[in-house]
Image (tube, grey):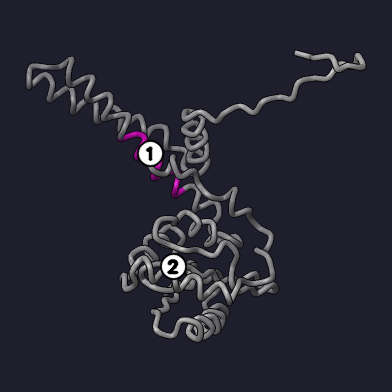
Amino acid sequence: MARKKNDGENVSAAPTEKKQRWYHNIRDAYRLTRQVNPSITWVLVGVFVLVMGVALGIGFAWGHPVYMSFFGLLLALMAMMILLATQTRKASYSQIDGRPGAAGAVLGQIRRGWNIEEQPVAVNPRHQDLVYRMVGRPGIVLVSEGPSHRVTRMLDDERKKVARVAPNVPVHLVQYGNEQGQVPIGKLTRTVQGLKKTLTTAEVGQVAKRLQALGSARTPVPKGIDPMKARPDRKGMRGR
């Protein structure tokens, strides 16, 4: 609708943004996964048929086919959502794997119990190698992005810096990549979260404050991907 100002001019009302419904998230997740895995449609159908078949079989054997068909429908839909969430996460990772900022985009999904620097603490602008820093109950974790022969020196330099500020805190070095001895993108989160816990929650906050004095790299993340746009939908990843 249009409204009139005091001077008689017509001014169009500002358009309102449409809310992203839950089924829109599912649709987007499905489209993203299908681009990487075209067979996802038949896989989802197969899961639905399998779960419903088992539920109906139990229902007829039990003498309650109607009840089990309803229960089987809910279970089949849940199984499909879990499978789609898993495949969507893999598809998202495969699209950003090897691009500058990929490690930061994945690490940005870790929230609870971790203090993560949004910007890399070390940047090699020539080769676009990066080092990210995060603090959690396992201690200080430095995650590199780039070939092993180049990032090894960068990780060692950062380890010496944090050791001066927090000398008694364990420092873990993790190399993201596809070379031997490096951690692929699909296992990066699991590797970091699987480190042995040695600090308390209060100590994590204290160490994070100490490291703030070191700051982060002045050079921004190299152009390649926008980590904010590259992050997969967290609700979709959890199957919600």
Which is in the foreground here, disc 2 or disc 1?
Answer: 2
Indicate the position of residue 101 as horizontal and vertical percent values: 59, 61
**Predominant SS along the magenta part:** helix
Which kind of residue does numbered mark 2 sit on?
A: Gly
| Residue type for callout 1 | Gly
Q: Is residue 106 left or right of residue 4?
A: left
Residue sitting at x 49%, y 34%: 25
User: Which part of the image, by quadrant, shows the C terminus?
Assistant: top left
What secondary structure is marked by label 1? Answer: loop
Task: Characterize the local packing of mark 2: few (<14), some (14-19) or many (20 or more) Cα atoms within 10 angstroms.
Answer: some
* Quadrant containing the N terminus in the rendered view: top right
Residue 47 at x, y percent in the picture = 30, 33
Q: CA distance from mark 2 to mark 1?
A: 31 Å
Q: Would you say residue 87 sits in the magenta stretch? A: yes
Q: Which residue is mark 2?
A: 205
Q: Is residue 235 magenta?
A: no
Instruction: Work out which residue is located at the far left of the displayed protein and give it.
Output: 62
- Residue that appears at 41% across and 76% down: 172
Measuring from the top left, give residue 28's x and y in whole percent. 52, 35
Q: Nearer the viewer, residue 174 or 162?
A: 162
Depth check: give the residue in front, 65 or 22. Answer: 22
Residue 174 appears in the picture as rendered: no
Q: Write the start and end of the magenta stretch as one range.
A: 79-90
Position of 122 compared to 74: left or right? right
Q: Residue furthest front?
A: 6
Q: Quadrant of residue 117?
A: bottom right
Which one is earlier in the sequence, the residue at label 2 or at label 1? 2
Give me the disc on residue 239: 1
Q: Disc 2 on helix, strand or loop?
A: helix
Decide: is 10 above or below 160: above
Where residue 223 appears, x then y in whole percent?
A: 69, 60
